[in-house]
Image: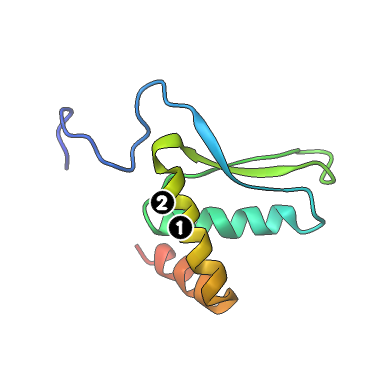
Amino acid sequence: MPSDNEVNASDPRPDEALAPVFSSSNHDAEMEALTIKGILEASGVPAMIVGPQVLPSLEFQVQVPEHMLAEAQRLIDEARAAGSEAAVEAEAAGEGQ
């Protein structure tokens, strides 16, 4: 267990803003946001979904700490390049941890 003085690279920094790494208002935006959040968290990148609770036609976003934006985008690009099968495998691997 890390001591109070140790900092994990995936932990948000104090007063760090979150940056959107994904944004969509498509009909399947919520499902895509959930998948992307799962991929990022399975890879150690903390992520948060921001979206409407009542009006699903509005935009959904996945946000990550600013200092992890490039890593998050790389992970999403790799998952998209590998296809949906790789995304399902990455999500399942994260659930087993």
On screen, 29 above or below 60? below
Front one among 86 and 3: 86
Element at label 1 = helix
Residue in the picture at 36% in, 52% down: 44
On screen, 96 above or below 61? below
* In-image side of 22 versus 2 (left or right): right
* Colouring rule applied to residues: rainbow
Residue in the picture at 38% in, 67% down: 96
* In-image side of 83 versus 23 (left or right): left
Q: Which of the 4 image quarters holds residue 59? A: top right
The label on residue 74 is 1
The kind of residue tagged 1 is Arg
| Contact flag, marks 2 and 1 (Cβ < 8 Å) | yes
Residue in the picture at 39% in, 58% down: 43
According to the image, label 2 marks what residue?
71
Q: Position of residue 5 (x, y in %)?
A: 15, 28
Q: Position of residue 74 (x, y in %)?
A: 45, 57
Q: CA distance from mark 2 to mark 1?
A: 5 Å
Give the quadrant of the C terminus. bottom left
Give the quadrant of the N terminus. top left
The answer to whether residue 88 is seen in the rendering is: no
Q: Position of residue 93 (x, y in %)?
A: 40, 69
Element at label 2 = helix
Q: Position of residue 36 (x, y in %)?
A: 56, 57
Residue in the picture at 37% in, 33% down: 12
In the displayed orientation, state which residue is furthest to the top: 15
